[in-house]
Amino acid sequence: MRLRQLTDTITQATRLRFMNAYFVREDDGLTLVDTTASGAAPALLRAAETLGAPIRRIVLTHGHGDHVGSLDALCAALSGEVEVLMPERDARILAGDTSRDHGESSAEVKGGWPTVTTTPGVLLVPGDRVGSLEVIASPGHTPGHVALLSHRDRALICGDALHTAGGTTVAGVRNWRFPLVAMATWDAQRALQSACELRALEPTLLAPGHGRGLAHPLAAIDRAIDRASSSTSGERRRVRSASS
Ligand SMILES: [Zn+2]
C-alpha cells in the first residue's frame, strides 16, 4: 500500500495502484474514508501505525465492494472500537433492499455489492459533519453516494463521483483507459448533476477513489463535465430515436 500525503491532514493510501482509501487526521485520531477491496485490513492498520494515530472511525462514500471490502476485517481487528458511518441509502442496498425511492431512475443498481456483516453505527445524510468533513450528497454512481468536503482547506474526497484514473472523468462516462467506474454507475445523468454540484463547491483538491489526488482541479473538472454533457445528451438522442 502506497501512502501519499496530500495535505497537512489528508493522506491517500493506494492499493494495487488503482484503489484509494484516505486517512484524515482529527483531534482524537484518524478517520478512514473507504477501505478498498477485501484483504486490505492489515495494510491499512500498518498505514495508521505509520501515521502514528489510531483509526477512530470509518466513513464509506458508497457501498461498492472496492470501497467497503475490508470493513468487516478492520472492525474485527479493531475489536469493534471504531465508529462506522455509511450513507443511509447505500446501507439499505447493502442490506438487500434494492427498491427505488420516489423519483429515482429505475435503472439497475450496478457494481459489486458484497455481503457486509458490520452494521453501521451512524447512517449518514447530507449535511452531517464527521470531524472536519461535511457529508455532501452526490448520487448517480450509486443512489446513496456521498462525497466529503474538508472544512479546513476545501479538499474534496469524492469517492467515485469523479475519478482521475486515465484522466479526470465524471462517473458514468466511458473512459477506455479506466472503464471500471462507468461500468458500475447506476444513473449517468444524475452523476453529471452531482459533478456540477461538487464543482460549485470550488474544491482546492480532488481526492478520488480511483486515480491520483489532483490539486487545483477546477479546470480539469470543467473539461470532464463538458465531456459528460456531450456524452449524456448523445445517449438521450439515441434513446429518443430508438423509441420513435
Ligand atoms: Zn463505486
Image (spheres, rainbow, N blue to C red):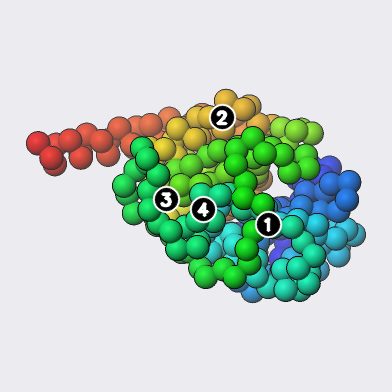
Task: Say which residue label 3 marks.
Answer: 185
In the image, what residue occupies the spot 56% across and 29% down? 199
Q: Is mark 3 within 8 Å of ligand 1?
A: yes
Task: Say which residue label 1 marks.
Answer: 121
N-terminal of the pair, mark 4 or mark 2, is: 4
Q: Amino acid at mark 1?
A: Gly
Alpha carbon of mark 4 to alpha carbon of mark 3: how far?
13 Å
Task: Say which residue label 2 marks.
Answer: 199
Regarding residue 156, the answer to whether it shows in the image is: no
- The answer to whether the residues at label 1 and label 2 have Cβ atoms under 8 Å apart is no
Q: Position of residue 157 (x, y in %)?
A: 65, 44
Left/right placement of residue 87 relative to residue 103 reads right
Q: Amino acid at mark 3?
A: Thr
Left/right placement of residue 113 relative to residue 124 reads left
Q: Amino acid at mark 4?
A: Asp
Task: Say which residue label 4 marks.
Answer: 90
Q: Position of residue 101 (x, y in %)?
A: 40, 44
- Which quadrant holds the C terminus? top left
N-terminal of the pair, mark 1 or mark 2, is: 1
Q: Position of residue 80 (x, y in %)?
A: 76, 68
Q: Circle 4 — which element?
A: helix
N-terminal of the pair, mark 3 or mark 1, is: 1
Q: Nearer the viewer, residue 52 or 83?
A: 83
In the image, what residue occupies the spot 34% across and 54% down? 108
Q: Amino acid at mark 2?
A: Arg
